[in-house]
Amino acid sequence: MRTSIATVSISGDLREKLEAIAAAGFDGVEIFENDFLAYDRSPRDVARMVADLGLTITLFQPFRDFEGLPEPQRSQAFERAERKFDLMAELGTDLMLVCSNVSPLALGGIDRAADDLRALGERAARHGLRVGYEALAWGRHVNDHRDAWEIVRRADHANIGIILDSFHTLSRGLDPNSIRSIPGDKIFIVQLADAPLIDMDLLYWSRHFRSMPGEGDLAVTDFMRAVAATGYDGPISLEIFNDQFRSGSPRTIAADGHRSLVYLMDQVRIAEPDIAIDVPVLPPRVDVQGVAFVEFAADEAEAETLAGHLRQLGFRLTGRHRSKAVDRFSQGDINIVINTEREGLAHSAYLTHGTSAYALGLMVDDAAATVQRAGALGAQLFSQRVGPDQLSIPAVRGIGGGVIYFLDEKSPLGRVWDIEFEVVDDPQQRSDAGLRRVDHVAQTMNYEEMLTWILFYRSIFVAEKSPMVDVVDPSGLVRSQVIENASGSLRLTLNGAESHRTLAGRFIAETFGSSIQHLAFASDDIFATADALRRNGMKTLEISPNYYDDLQARLGIEADMLDRLRAANILYDRDAEGEFFQLYSTNVGEGFFFEIVQRGAGYRGYGALNAPFRIAAQKRALAPLSVPEV
Ligand code: MG
Ligand code: MG
């Protein structure tokens, strides 16, 4: 597999773009003409820079408004093409993209367009160049790859081929299987982009909302399966126009792009076992069986405070690490680890973010294979010096800089608690609160980074993403998206903050980017849990009485039940499948909190309707910002 990406897809000047593209592991790059025009070096300098970075130029683009023109525009278009051919020779690329004409001057007619392309092919051949023709979804006469192919077929010239672009095909709802009949050697390059399903003008949608394959809702895998069936073995190139990407970090976006292609081609390989596809064979996507532990980094004083919160929640100290300053608290199947080491990643996480849940341990079938897959998808592998009584736990860095550890039952990793921890009795133990397991882990990030997180998780794990939900914070909007598997043993809620004045945004600012903002534990009886918490002296988040009045009006809850909810500050939701109860702690440290849920069988949501009232309550309970708002 040869990978490529258009320079327009990422931010920076041409050098920054190329460096990021090379660092991400791409083989080639499409030079988008404006990126070259805005750069102040000669074409030969650019050619040298590209070669020095170990890249090749797969394509020069775009050449617009060419075919079907009347005179004198037709002759002018050929003159224009000749000048670009000279430039391409200096840049050292042999392929030009011609996109279908959008000019009001353009005349229709497949044969007219074919004649023009044949004549352009003749000229290109004299320069040793090739021309690929692409149907724009909004082209004046040609807006369908089937028409573009018919034109290329009739042009019947060795130097003229078709360029396929998943966005142009899929955005118009065209069946990608119509690609299967195109001879693979007549496809000169394949451009890929995904996009969220939004009902809007095609041109605007394409120019602003494209995303990496796997980040959006289009059937890019089906598209690429059809391409693979033609025998095409040229570069697979990304052409992504996206406002967030153009203002994002070039390195991150380029890395996302490369990850998206490895993930996509892995899916294509699995879906088309009869086609020889030249891609590495990765271990399959990983089905997470549950959250094995959550690890906090803290200093000793804050560790005491956190331990106090955990005991109020019904956790008890069950283990002490044999050689490190690490304590284990347990309840039901939940394990919370507090790390107060003075060195290593936990300590640097503490120094950077304050007390924070910086690491997650996930139970999987095969921890080694999980890390192998993640590594092949560009995740950074993580390991620390292993002391006596310690296992080397396979791990990767998460997107926010935290760590994800993997445990399995097939290796000694499944006995990590016995091996690394000494069993202890908790002298300060309080009542068990009936918390069974981790229901979900909520991570907070800047909105611009959300797609990076989604792609990271979905490419490594068997997980689907829910539609994005807008959550109203009194100070702005937070976008919420769920990554989960069918059984619910992996549930991650991602919250993208657009404003630092929102609760989520403030958390990011105060903790310098720490990512896990709340942990939700499942109870089988939230009222019994609430009683235990009260006995344990825990203060729960106080919900406005107005919320309960509305709940009665909205859902017609019986008075008795409503009183119980109100008395315990429990939020309520239900849908056709079941009921959902939620209870929140007050804030722990810099905006971190715990949630307790009781999930009726079949209820798959997260109480999104309740979020604005919970957030408002949390903001009332917060101390004023330590930094003046500007
Ligand atoms: Mg394109
Ligand atoms: Mg939650």
Image: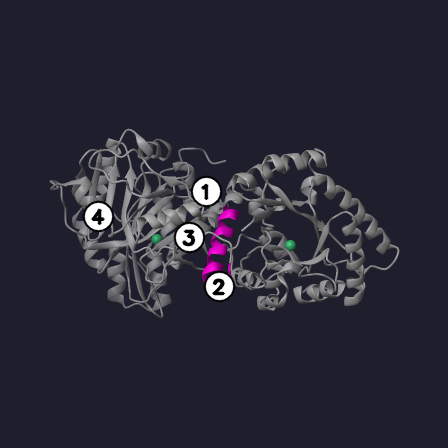
Comes first in the chain, label 2 or label 4 = 2
Mark 1 vs mark 3, CA separation in Å: 42 Å
Circles 2, 4 touching at the beta carbon (< 8 Å): no
Check disc 3 and report its element: helix, strand or loop.
loop
Q: Where is residue 339 in the image (x, y as percent from the top left)?
A: 26, 36
- Label 3 CA crowd tier, 10 Å (few <14, some 14–19, many 20+): some
Q: What residue type is labelled 1?
A: Arg
Q: What residue type is labelled 2?
A: Glu
Q: Does the magenta stretch include residue 548?
A: no
Q: Which disc is residue 501 wearing?
A: 1
Check disc 1 and report its element: helix, strand or loop.
loop
Check disc 4 and report its element: helix, strand or loop.
loop
What range of the chain is rendered magenta?
A: 256-276
* Label 4 CB less than 8 angstroms from ligand 2: no
Report the residue at 32% width, 60% height from top.
488
316 relative to 43 in the view: left or right: left
Q: Main secondary structure of the magenta part?
A: helix
Q: Which amino acid does label 4 sit on?
A: Leu
Q: Nearer the viewer, mark 1 or mark 3?
A: 3
The answer to whether residue 391 is above or below residue 153 is: above
Mark 2 vs mark 3, CA separation in Å: 15 Å
Comes first in the chain, label 1 or label 3 = 3
Residue at image mark 4: 313
Q: Which amino acid does label 3 sit on?
A: Leu
Q: Position of residue 164 (x, y in %)?
A: 63, 59
Comes first in the chain, label 4 or label 3 = 3
Query: Which of the 4 image quarters holds residue 513?
Result: top left
Q: Which disc is residue 272 wearing?
A: 2
Q: Which of marks 1 and 4 is in front?
A: 4
Mark 2 vs mark 1, CA separation in Å: 48 Å
Circles 2, 1 touching at the beta carbon (< 8 Å): no
Residue at image mark 3: 282
